[in-house]
Image (spheres, rainbow, N blue to C red):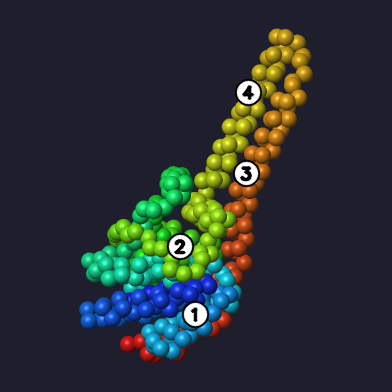
């Protein structure tokens, strides 16, 4: 069985060579068991020497396949590029910063041989800050009440996929991609095991608070239209409240005579309703924007350099 390791890279010149050494060791251990490996690295428009390091790795190891994108398209596009260029019977998706331990590849292969199409590594939150753990739990509890699939806390892109799962994911051509949700949506027999996340060996993560919030919003909006339905019901509730308030004012005027409502009450009501309307417009705008990008049918990424054709003939 040929196993493809797909690793998106962004400014990873300090760690990608070390990562390759570790996955090479695993490949050497699996070779006597009848499993060959190829390594598909996707340079997502890095600003450092990541591409140069990948070229050096390819010169010394014919199993290395690199794809360099014309600019930084984001991790989702880089992951899609890696899946499209992977030719293995099974594909393992993992980060190149060594936070996904390469030693777990052997366990994934063992579980794959038991018939599972997806072998998913679930990270424990041991050692995480309490605020981060509580925030993550709250997010997943909220999201799983809204979306049409189940997203598991601690489960990311680190997993083994069978060829039919890869083909199914590649058949989903949507522009706004949320891979964690797509993997859950396609289904197929899956199993999960836990591991403790390793410390990043070098460099700095490109994720910041804004990126994490946008990623979380993508997960919320990519697999349901319930925010739109919630906006509808909120409007109905506000209309009902307005009708009850009007009835109360009319009744009070008939009983006690005409009274001028308080200034504070009017300002509060106008401000609250304006805020609700802006939130509703924002939700509608998010969905409209996604339709806008889907209709344009632009490619998910553009390739600047690759050695895929050169290495394809070298892989048995």
Question: Mark 2, mark 1: which one is toward the viewer?
Answer: 1
Q: Label 4's element?
A: helix
| Cα distance in 3D space between marks 1 and 4 | 63 Å
Residue depicted at 51% across the width and 64% down the height: 205
Q: Label 3's element?
A: helix
Q: How busy is the neighbourhood of tag 2: few (under 14 within 10 Å), some, or many (20 plus)?
A: some
Residue depicted at 34% across the width and 61% down the height: 121
The residue at which mark 4 appears reads as: 244
Q: Is residue 162 visible?
A: no
Q: Quadrant of residue 27?
A: bottom left
Residue depicted at 45% across the width and 76% down the height: 16
- Residue 144: x and y in percent read 43, 47
The residue at which mark 3 appears reads as: 280
Q: How busy is the neighbourhood of tag 3: few (under 14 within 10 Å), some, or many (20 plus)?
A: some
- Whichever of callouts 1 and 4 sits on the residue coming sooner in the sequence is 1
Q: As rendered, which of 10 and 68 lies closer to the eye?
A: 10
| Cα distance in 3D space between marks 2 and 1 | 19 Å
Q: Label 2's element?
A: helix
Quarter of the image where the N terminus is located: bottom left
- Whether pointer 3 and pointer 2 mark residues with C-beta atoms closer than 8 Å, the reply is no
| Cα distance in 3D space between marks 1 and 3 | 41 Å
The residue at which mark 2 appears reads as: 179
The residue at which mark 1 appears reads as: 67
- Whichever of callouts 2 and 4 sits on the residue coming sooner in the sequence is 2
């Amino acid at each position: 069985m040929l196993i493809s390791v797909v690793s998106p890279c962004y400014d990873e010149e300090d760690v990608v060579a070390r990562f390759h050494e570790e996955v090479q060791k695993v490949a050497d251990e699996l070779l006597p068991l009848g499993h060959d490996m190829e390594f598909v690295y996707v340079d997502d428009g890095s600003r450092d020497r990541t591409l140069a390091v990948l070229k050096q790795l390819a010169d010394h190891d014919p199993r290395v396949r690199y794809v360099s994108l014309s600019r930084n398209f984001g991790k989702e596009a880089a992951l899609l590029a890696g899946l499209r260029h992977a030719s293995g019977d099974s594909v393992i998706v993992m980060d190149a910063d060594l936070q996904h331990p390469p030693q777990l590849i052997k366990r994934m292969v063992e579980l794959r041989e038991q018939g599972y199409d997806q072998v998913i590594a679930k990270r424990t939150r041991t050692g995480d800050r309490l605020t981060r753990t509580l925030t993550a739990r709250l997010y997943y509890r909220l999201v799983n009440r809204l979306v049409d699939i189940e997203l598991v806390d601690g489960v990311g892109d680190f997993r083994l996929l069978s060829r039919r799962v890869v083909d199914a994911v590649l058949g989903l051509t949507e522009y706004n991609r949320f891979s964690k949700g797509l993997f859950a949506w396609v289904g197929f027999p899956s199993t999960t095991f836990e591991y403790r996340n390793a410390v990043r060996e070098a460099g700095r993560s490109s994720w910041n608070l804004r990126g994490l919030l946008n990623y979380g919003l993508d997960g919320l909006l990519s697999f349901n239209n319930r925010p739109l339905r919630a906006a509808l019901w909120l409007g109905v509730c506000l209309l009902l409240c307005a009708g009850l308030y009007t009835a109360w004012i009319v009744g009070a005027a008939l009983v006690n005579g005409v009274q001028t409502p308080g200034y504070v009450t009017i300002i509060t009501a106008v401000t609250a309703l304006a805020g609700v309307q802006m939130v509703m417009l924002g939700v509608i705008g998010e969905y409209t924007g996604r339709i806008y990008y889907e209709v344009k049918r632009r490619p998910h990424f553009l390739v600047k350099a690759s050695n895929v054709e050169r290495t394809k003939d070298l892989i048995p």
